[in-house]
Amino acid sequence: MNDTSIEYLEKVRQDFETSAFWKFLGLQTQKLAEGDVELYLPYRPQYDNVRGTIHGGMYMSVLDTTMGMLCRSLGSDDVMTIEMATHFLKPAVQEAIYSKASVINRGRSTALVDGKLYNENDELVAHCTATFKLN
């Protein structure tokens, strides 16, 4: 990786980690490389729904952020989620979660991205695909 790529990825990291939404969620970057992103969310009781499990909206927020950061890591300065389909596979109960993303297909102006969310036992708790507009 050249110095320009390292500088660009650092800008991506700063853009995300200094955003109010990122801080509100409490996300942490575990890995950020070109086309390779992993985020971590420590558990907070405020994430629980009325069933005592982490709310699905938290799942989707973490996945959307991970996939957006992945698109940015590929060199798009501005990305926007066009659509997102999420499958909730297993509840996360009072535990941290982490996410990974990968590109399925990339065109000139859009990318189809795959996102996966895991619990502390490395069990898949949610899977999604999303289309992003790339600028």
Image (tube, grey):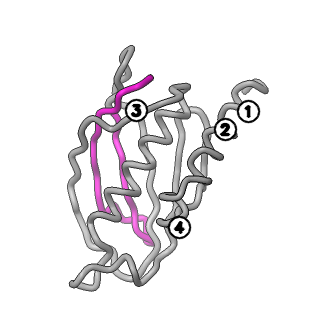
Q: Amino acid at mark 4?
A: Gly
Magenta residues?
113-135
The amino acid at mark 3 is Val
| Residue matched to label 4 | 26
Residue receiving disc 2: 11
Image-based side of 87 in relation to 57, left or right: left
Q: Is residue 127 above or below residue 76?
A: below
Residue at image coords 29%, 39%: 130
Q: CA distance from mark 3 to mark 1?
A: 22 Å
Res 61 quadrant in image: bottom left
Label disc, if present, on residue 52 of the rendered structure:
none
Q: Which mark is residue 103?
A: 3
Disc 2 secondary structure class? helix
Q: CA distance from mark 3 to mark 2?
A: 21 Å
Q: Eyeballing the image, is 39 above or below 58?
A: above
Query: Which of marks 2 and 4 precedes in the sequence?
Result: 2
